[in-house]
Image: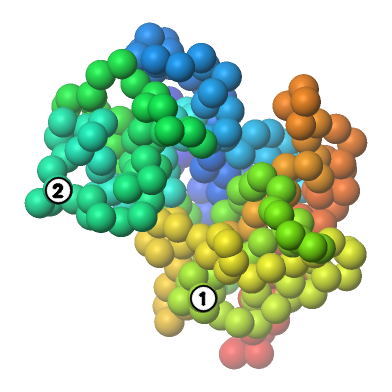
Amino acid sequence: MDAPAQPSFDFLGAPVPASPVLLSVPHAGRDYPRQLLDLLRVPAAALLVLEDRYVDAIAYAARRDETMLVARRPRAWIDLNRSESERDPRVDAGASPASSPFHSPRVQNGLGLVPRRAGGAEDLWRRRLSGEEVAARIAADHRPYHAALADLLEAARQRFGAAVLLDIHSMPSLNGENPARIVLGDRFGRSACGALVERAAALVAASGLGLALNTPYAGGYILDRHGRPSRHVHAIQIEFDRALYLDMLTQQPHDGIARMARLLRAIIDALADELLGRAQAAE
């Protein structure tokens, strides 16, 4: 499989993966098209809450020879962690309540395939998008990203007997007493085998950071689409509390990046060890 030509995401590593662990960073894109900025009815800074801001810096620092996809386009343009069917008729003239899951909480809350809101009640856009505009984004950005992930996972499975996708995100700080700083999601056991999640969870616990499993983030469309444990293809989402690596005033990374990268590196190594160990035992 060849790397995509001029994609809206960065493709790092070999088309035939060197590791059974693949990395995905779908929400850290900061390449805002002029067309998007011209459509805004709110300040561009209002879109920052949609970004997993600079979580790609953690992934870049942790990665060695793993194949990794990193979205360049922002989530405000199109959300790679939503199904093509999660189109919001209030912002997308090509969608209709009859053909789209309009009653899903994500679409109702303005966080469908093309977000309508960004953490507030005010709509983002000056007008509804045409169906053709959204279809073009799906064809240029959404489908190539997921096609690349599917091909890479299958190539890794064929080479190593199994593969795991680590889908890397960040989250606002959670409320409550002793809140989790890291959340692992596996769609409540549907997208990855328990042993892999347990290896990752043990490393987070050993780091001293608070951990939660699937609450409040169990993973989204990426895990639903690509996690197939019955076929030895697994998918796990990891959410980092942004305050662990980001100055919340300047929205720029601080030296916590290095600590988070070390933790992510340890998780990558543990997942690879688990899958390679299983493959050797099966021989």
Q: Position of residue 2 (x, y in %)?
A: 43, 41
> Would you call the spot at circle 2 few (<14 residues within 10 Å), some (14-19), or many (20 or more)?
few
SS class of the residue under badge 1?
A: loop
Residue 248 appears anywhere in the view: yes
Left or right of 42 in this view: 133 = left
Q: Position of residue 189 (x, y in %)?
A: 52, 78
> Would you call the spot at circle 1 few (<14 residues within 10 Å), some (14-19), or many (20 or more)?
few
Compare residues 3 and 191 and report the one nearer the observer: 191
Residue placed under numbered mark 2 in the picture: 97
The mark tally for this picture is 2
Spatial separation of the CA atoms under disc 1 and disc 2: 28 Å
Query: Mark 2 is on which residue type?
Result: Pro
Color encoding of the figure: rainbow
Q: Position of residue 155 (x, y in %)?
A: 47, 61
SS class of the residue under badge 2?
A: loop
Residue at the image point whose x is 58% and y is 68% from the top: 214
Residue placed under numbered mark 1 in the picture: 188
Q: With respect to residue 206, does 95 lie above or below?
A: above
Residue at the image point whose x is 71% and y is 54% from the top: 175
Tell me the tag on residue 75.
Answer: none
